[in-house]
Amino acid sequence: MSSSSDWDGAISGYADTTSFSGSMSFERSADKCMGITNIAGDVGTNTLRWTSTGFTGTCSGGALPQSVILTLQRQ
């Protein structure tokens, strides 16, 4: 079951042993809001940190993020 605030999305791109470059997209079916951004950053042995400069898309009312920072750490 999903609610009107649920988002679905995907990340795709290219990675090597030290970096990633690709795109991230998402959509919220309740109001047909869709967005996409380029995302890139470092890949380490136990961490990754990717950033974007902002989304473009079809959302109204300022619903798109200005920027995204995705940080993961292996524990």
Image (cartoon, rainbow, N blue to C red):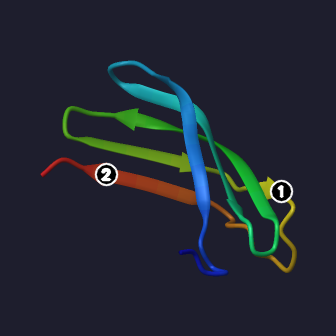
Q: From the top left corner, tell me how far across and down residue 4 is, in percent.
A: 67, 81
Q: From the top left corner, tell me how far across and down residue 23 is, in percent.
A: 63, 38
Q: Is residue 52 above or below residue 62?
A: above
Left or right position of 14 against 54: left
- Quarter of the image for residue 21 reads top right
Within 10 Å of disc 2 (Cα), the crowding (few <14, some 14-19, many 20+) is few
Q: Is residue 58 above or below residue 74?
A: below
Look at 56% across and 34% down and name the residue there: 12
Instruction: Give the mark nearer the N terminus: 2 vs 1.
Output: 1
Please state which amino acid type lies under the numbered disc 2.
Leu
Looking at the image, the residue that sits furthest to the front is: 1
Look at 47% across and 37% down and name the residue there: 41
How many numbered discs?
2
Left or right position of 75 against 18: left
Q: Is residue 17 above or below residue 73?
A: above
- Quarter of the image for residue 64 reads bottom right
Look at 60% across and 80% down and name the residue there: 3
Please state which amino acid type lies under the numbered disc 1.
Gly
Q: Secondary structure at mark 2?
A: strand
CA separation, marks 2 and 1? 26 Å
Within 10 Å of disc 1 (Cα), the crowding (few <14, some 14-19, many 20+) is some
- Which residue has dot 1 on it? 57
Look at 67% across and 52% down and name the residue there: 53
Looking at the image, the residue that sits furthest to the left is: 75
- Which residue has dot 2 on it? 72
Viewer-proximal residue among 36 and 30: 30
